Image (cartoon, rainbow, N blue to C red):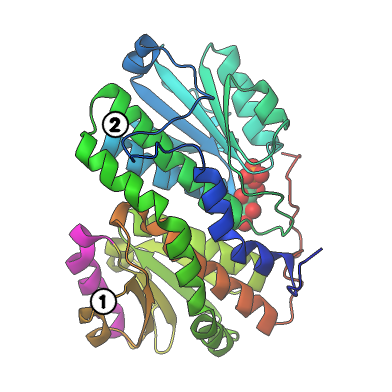
Amino acid sequence: ERGGYPHFMLKEIYEQPRAIRDTLTGRIADDLSRVTLPELSWSDDFVQSMDRVHIVACGTSWHAGLVGKAVMEKLTRIPVDVEIASEYRYRDPIETAGTLVIVISQSGETLDTLAALRDAKARGRHVLAITNVVGSSVAREADDVIITWAGPEIAVASTKAYTTQLVVLYLLAVYLGQRRGTLEDGTAKQILAALAELPMAAEQVLDTAPQVERFAREWADARDTFFIGRGIDYAMALEGALKLKEISYIHAEAYAAGELKHGTLALITEGVPVIALATQTDLYEKTLSNIKEVKARDAFVLGVTFAGDEEMRHSVDEVLYVPRTLPVLAPVITVIPLQLLAYYAAVARGNDVDKPRNLAKSVTVE
Ligand code: F6R
């Protein structure tokens, strides 16, 4: 059932090219001109009157929401808030009649997310669910559903569900941007062409596995690690740190790279592993200067950037190159080596990878 892989998590990591392809299938026009989402029967009035989006989720799905916010705001200019479901439920969120609530849940059964959905519906909000499980509670109760075709995810640590959630959020952002007239056709085509190439890029990035395994073995005894990045690379840092903590039990902290000198720099000492993500062109120089700050404190820096970037080599100890894509789509590719890092670190420490201590696959309690 694990298809020859030693763990479900590794199998699911390697399934990502296929999962991404299945999630894209039928949703991009052949001429790459537009997104088709027949599951949404949204009128022009509904689309035009949308003036706010609240994305609500937990854990890794919340991290996908953080990327979703950046992309939706960029392409649609609608203000987007991303909320942790267990926080959102106990606030009094500021909503308008035109607020769309998007819940993201792999399982579709997470109690806090489901309760947030029910509350939003009770307040009269329109709720769209992005979920991996057809017929789940979230899928049944939302007004609209977009399924991520990742297939069953067995390992507790979420991998292919996350990348396919990102794909759905990109499709949705392009869809709304085009319907609202905030996204030019040329730009849409460029994004859709790059989306269509993601399964191939995901396949290529899996070739970094031996290099990542070597880092993981070297760092298996580390006490603390740091993941830094700016913009959507910061969202990646959060996801990379969660994955590592969750299954390897190595302490990991994610930091917006520019925030380091507001306290955290005191924890960066000789040999501390720092994973620095630098895929965002407009933030590249700023991130590089943050990398120099940690290098000056003798951290061991692994830089993650697009293939072809030679500049990075001079500032870090090691570089992990990922296949180039549009910066906005980078998370789908860069997360894969971060998942592998967590996986190999957990294996090196002899942990039960698929069932980390004290965690459940589907959290149906508060
Ligand atoms: C982390 C992980 C959890 C889930 C969270 C939400 O690897 O798997 O953080 O992402 O429990 O679960 P769903 O998406 O099923 O609502």
Q: Is residue 31 magenta?
A: no
For discs 1 and 2, the disc positioned in front in the rendered view: 1
- The magenta region covers 280-297
Q: Sequence order check: which comes first, mark 1 or mark 2?
A: 2
Dot 2 falls on a residue whose secondary structure is: helix
In the image, taking residue 352 as reference, residue 311 lies left or right, namely left
Magenta segment main secondary structure = helix
Q: In the rendered structure, which amino acid carries the disc numbered 2?
A: Thr
Whole-percent x, y for residue 231 in the image: 31, 54
Query: x, y percentage for residue 205?
Result: 46, 71
Answer above or below: position of 250 versus 316: above
- Is there any visible trace of residue 248 in the rendered image? yes
* Residue at x 39% of width, y 62% of height: 255
Q: Amino acid at mark 1?
A: Gly
Residue 76's tag is 2
Local packing at callout 1 (Cα closer than 10 Å; few below 14, some 14-19, many 20+) is few
